[in-house]
Amino acid sequence: MPAGSGASQCLSVESDGANIGFRNHCNYGVQFAYCLQRASDPATACDAGTKTGTVPANGFEPVLLNANIKTADAEHDFRWVACSGNAGDVVAHLDRSEPPVGRCVRGGI
């Protein structure tokens, strides 16, 4: 499945009370790659690279721990692509952040 058609619509940026992360609203696992437009941590800044992760079916994966920003502000800053599949089966790559464009690579290559 191409990035942006299906799996990306499964994810939303939410808070669990202390952390900001991705909530998967689908009944299958999702691999994601993301960056933040305005990030103080260079590891997550869109101009420096991307981070990847996995959200299990109907699960939540925190990516900003003890975040003291509003969920609405965080959602505006996040750029992501997502791929349906389990870790090791597919890897999400965010190739460009504005607008978000990426790809799903089968087999983790």
Image: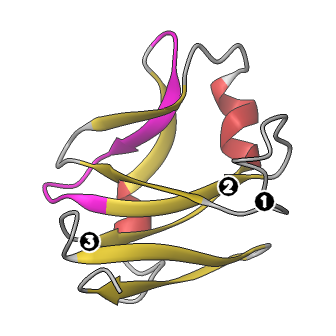
Labels 1 and 3 touching (C-beta < 8 A): no
Identify the element where label 3 is drawn: strand
SS class, disc 1: loop
Image location of residue 55, percent across then percent down = 29, 48
Which of the labelled discs sits on residue 35, or is there none?
A: 2
Disc number lying in front (1 or 3): 1
Figure quadrant of the C terminus: bottom left
Above or below for 25 versus 101: above
The range drawn in magenta is 17-30
For discs 3 and 2, the disc positioned in front in the rendered view: 2
Is label 1 in contact with label 2 (beta carbons under 8 Å)?
yes
Q: Disc 3 marks which residue?
A: 84
Which of the two labelled residues, at mark 1 and mark 3, occupies the earlier sequence position?
A: 1
Q: Which mark is residue 46?
A: 1
Q: Residues within 10 Å of mark 3 (few under 14, many from 20)?
A: many
Seen at 80% across and 45% down, the residue is 42
| Marks 3 and 2 close (CB-CB < 8 Å) | no
Q: Position of residue 36 (x, y in %)?
A: 74, 49
Amino acid tagged 3? Ser
Q: Identify which amino acid the numbered label 2 is placed on.
A: Cys
The kind of residue tagged 1 is: Cys
Q: Earlier in the sequence, mark 3 or mark 2?
A: 2
Near-viewer residue (64 or 24): 64
State the image coordinates of residue 101 (x, y, percent, origin top left): 63, 81
Mark pair 3, 2: CA separation: 19 Å
Across and down, in percent, residue 10 comes to 35, 58
Badge 2 density bin: few <14, some 14–19, many ≥20, Cα 10 Å: many
